[in-house]
Image (cartoon, rainbow, N blue to C red):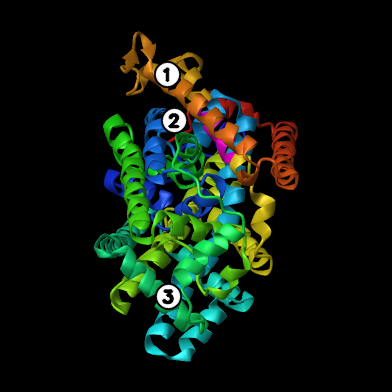
Amino acid sequence: MTNSTKTFLRTKSGLVRAMGPFDALLLNIVCISFFSSSIFAFQMTPLLFPGANVSVSFILAIIFSVPLYLTWAMLATSMPRSGGDYVFASRLVHPALAFIATFSAWVFWQWWYQGIFPSQIVFQSIAPFLTKLGATTGNTWYFEASAWSVSTTGLITLGLIMLIISFLLAIPGVSFYAKVQRVMFILAGLAVLALLYVLVVSTPETFSQNLNSLLAQATGEKIDWYNKIIEAAAAAGYVKTSINWYDTVATVPVTMMCMGYGFWSIMVMGEVKEATSSKLVNYQILGSVAITGIFFAVLYALMVKVAGFDFYNAFFYLYMVADPIMAKIPFTPNYMFLGMVVSPNIAVDFIIALGSALNVFNLMIQMYVIGSRVMFAQTFDRIWPEKLAHISTKFISPINAMVVYFIGSLVWLIIAAYNPLLYFYFTAVVLGVILTYLIDSIAGIVFPYKMKEVYSASPIAKYKIGGVPAIVLCGIGGVVFSLFLLYFYATVPALGLQNPTSVGIVLAVYVVLLVYYYLTRWYRKRYQGIDIDLAFKEVPPD
């Protein structure tokens, strides 16, 4: 039985290092995701920054984010514990600030994402494939099935099935998840190759002809859809803009909607082998950013080559402004749809649809793994009830924390299904993410001075530039980059931080969590004789 007067919940975490460095690399790639939040970056740019060369924006995102990613890598190798940035930010910056930042960013708001990921799978993979199948075979059942899948009933039914299956696949622990991840990654990789292939071999003429034919079959209107869309965008207010550096640089914060998550292996660092190897951790983190960033840069160049710059911008502009013409098109505009337009047969369509769906579904499994580890680490410091840190003897994972994560995700799934425009109220969620970037960067700056013994014993102590610890310089670079992101999110209205309702909701979550933290701190000390502040003076047990 646990001694309630101990600093930590127990003397051992109970977790096992069962994930290899390569699987940690795949985890980060899946988190950035070939087919998930990257879609929003491509959809939003024509409205926000129509003169952007998005390929260059992604390359700049890789370069600009290096100091921030190096900071995460160095901190993780120095304190390789599951829970990620909560662990080192609570020791190096402030426990209350670290708690509200990491729980809101990596748990509470991720419940929202977990709740809408099933809808994304339906809208970007299932419904388009069924519609394409109906147009190809002439069988109206496929059109009806596609329509049902995007209905409220369909979204809740399919979403519940996905939430349950992903939950069950996450329970056995990281060793099992790594095996599942490899299979799904291979299938997603086939979709990537198929998508790139059809875009490489296709021509603008093929694209416009196929688009007109597909939409004629799907809508019953035999018109020149390609030029109709370009004309509709101009009528709706789209102004053609030459490619320029301002729009290209300003798009970097938009690309970080996906590129800003290539470090999540640090959340399970207490379960990763050779976690104190700086080279391997940098390989896991920087490797994922480079691989995905280059993929997105190539993908954009190919889409513009095939669809044409004017059509590409017009198509996504109309979607973002909810123009009436888009209601006629039974597809959600994304790059899988553009690939399906020029794919040579239904088999290629199936590969793209299956791979893209499994890529997002893989991320759903990962969300349970990551979110539960953040809650586990906070519980180990006695912030949450003890049961959330329970480790099953059969499955080496915090199952109770996963159950809480499932319930939170299910609530958001139902709310989102009945309120498809709910995202308007949460556009400022990015504020919480940038706050964690800032806190983590500050943690890197103060690390060599606030926890001297831990730093001196760490594998990163030998890295210095001009006598200054490398992590300090990287932390400063991370702060600068975070402020760069914050500037654009605060000054561009459509990016969300000028939405008072959304900002108010985000701040309200912070206030509730802050009150909870200090009430828990007071209760532990007053009624249990536990000073939780002592836990933040040392690295938690492995």
Marks 3/2 in contact by CB < 8 Å: the verdict is no
Q: Amino acid at mark 2?
A: Leu
- Mark 1 highlights which residue? 473
Of marks 3 and 2, which one's residue comes earlier in the chain? 2
Q: Residue at x 61, y 44 (%)?
A: 495
Residue 425 percent across, percent down from the top left: 69, 52
- Mark 3 highlights which residue? 212
Indicate the quadrant where residue 324 lies.
bottom right
SS type, badge 3 = helix
Q: Quadrant of the N terminus?
A: top right
Gap between marks 1 and 3 measured at Cα: 54 Å
Please say if 176 is above or below 66. Answer: below
Please say if 154 is above or below 20. Answer: below
Asked if residue 157 lies left or right of residue 455, the reply is right
Please say if 194 is above or below 24. Answer: below
Residue 447 percent across, percent down from the top left: 47, 20
Between residue 390 and residue 359, name the one nearer to us.
Answer: 359
- Mark 2 highlights which residue? 68
Residue 175 percent across, percent down from the top left: 34, 54
Gap between marks 2 and 1 measured at Cα: 10 Å
Report the predominant secondary structure element of the magenta stretch.
helix
